[in-house]
Amino acid sequence: MNRAERENPAAVDWLDQPISCDGCPDDVKPEGRCELMKACVRDRSVQRIAKFFSWNPDVANDYLKHPYFEVRACAAKHADVFHLRTLVNDPDETVRWAAVMRLPRSYLLRLIHDPHREVRIRVASRLSEQDLDVMIDDPDYYVRLMVAKHLPEHKLPLMIDDEDPEVRRTVARRIPREWLGRMLLDADAVVRMEVVRRLPDSALLSLVRDPDWRIRYEAAVRGSKEVLQLLVDDPDTEVRGYARERLDTWGPVELNDYREER
């Protein structure tokens, strides 16, 4: 297929059979309601199907049981909400995904265990805050990431031990400050860095022995004189160099007086 064919494919249906305007239902044939190669519900092209329903939203209910899933999915974007409930059990995830975007809350809850991640991601993006905690243990990390982004802050401690570091990183950005100390023990340095960025300068003393140089460097950048004095012998060149540079601004310092015995 060349570029012209890709951009303007032939008029064929979902079974790869040529189509024409002959035989179209009378309710869509009047002038202006459809156009071959542009807006046609019988066409295989999703763009042409979508254009058809944008011109004819009033007939969308009639196509929710169409054998071609793309027709059902496009119709779901325009059908009456009352009729969408039948799509909760549609065999195709694209159709269920389209329905999720408009279904009321009571039906969204029926899809929290949908077998397809894209459906559950959309469910998580639309559930109210008070319902989101039912998806905290979803098997897919991106679903849980959506939950972590929208879950009420007081419920975020439930996700501190999530197995995915990106989820925990999102939790660290939003969790109430009284829980930050617990997250300083996270095994992932990127998560700990999110915590450090929210810590007050007075709490940086606890970071001078962190195993990751980036976190110790953050302590050197923001820390007090006491913190800097504990970093002047840091094993990392950048950390100890910056600590000594900042100490110089406080005047002469006897470094040996502040070296911690090892």
Image (cartoon, grey):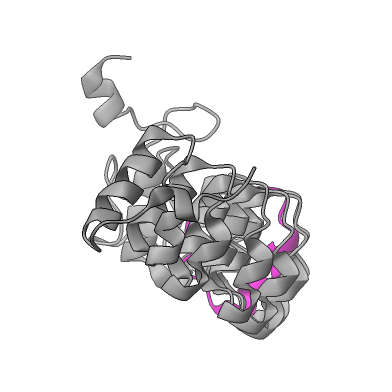
Quadrant of the image containing the C terminus = top right
Q: Please state the horizontal and vertical placement of residue 5, each as a whole percent of the image.
A: 27, 22
What main secondary structure does the magenta stretch of the protein show? helix
Q: Nearer the viewer, residue 104 or 172?
A: 172
Q: Residue at x 73, y 49 (%)?
A: 163
For this orientation, the residue located farthest to the top is 1
Q: Residue at x 70, y 64 (%)?
A: 160
Give the vertical position of 195 relative to 106 (above or below).
Answer: above
Residue 92 is a magenta residue: yes
Magenta stretch bounds: 74-98
Q: Is residue 80 depicted above or below 185 in this figure?
A: below
The structure residue drawn at horizontal position 41% and vertical position 46%, both measured from the top left corner, is 232
Tell me the quarter of the picture where residue 27 sits: bottom left
Residue 222 appears in which quarter of the rendering?
A: bottom left
Left or right of 27, for residue 104: right
| Nearer the observer, 204 or 31 | 204
Horizontal and vertical percent position of residue 74: 47, 56
Task: Note whether residue 172 is visible.
Answer: yes
Q: Position of residue 248 (x, y in %)?
A: 24, 54
Residue 118, can we see it? no
